[in-house]
Amino acid sequence: GDTVGDPFKDTSGPSLNILIKLMSMVSIVMAGLTVAFSIL
C-alpha cells in the first residue's frame, strides 16, 4: 500500500508474523504432548 505507516509496518510485520507462528507451533506441540502423556 501507499499509506504513511507502511514502511514501519513492512519492517515489523514479518518478524512479528514469524514470532506468532513460532509461538502457536510451540503451544500446539506442547498441547499435543500433554494430551499424549495424559492418555498414557
Image (cartoon, helix red, strand yellow):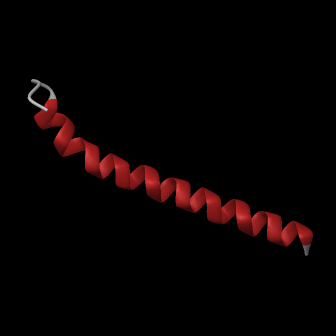
From this viewpoint, which residue is outermost toward the right? Answer: 40
- Residue at the far top: name it: 4
Residue depicted at x 56% and y 61%: 26
Residue 9 is situated, as x and y percent measured from the top left of the image, at 20, 36
Quadrant of the image for the N terminus? top left
Looking at the image, residue 31 sits to the left or right of residue 16; the answer is right
For the point 29% across and 51% down, which residue is it? 15
- 4 versus 7 height, above or below: above
Q: For residue 31, what is the image quadrant?
A: bottom right
Q: Is residue 40 above or below residue 20?
A: below
The quarter of the picture where the C terminus appears is: bottom right
Q: What percent of the width, then of the height, locates residue 3?
A: 11, 25
Residue at 78 percent of width and 64 percent of height: 34
Left or right of 21, for residue 37: right
Q: Position of residue 4 (x, y in %)?
A: 9, 24
Q: How many marks?
A: 0
Q: Residue furthest bottom?
A: 40
Residue under the point 36% across and 55% down:
18
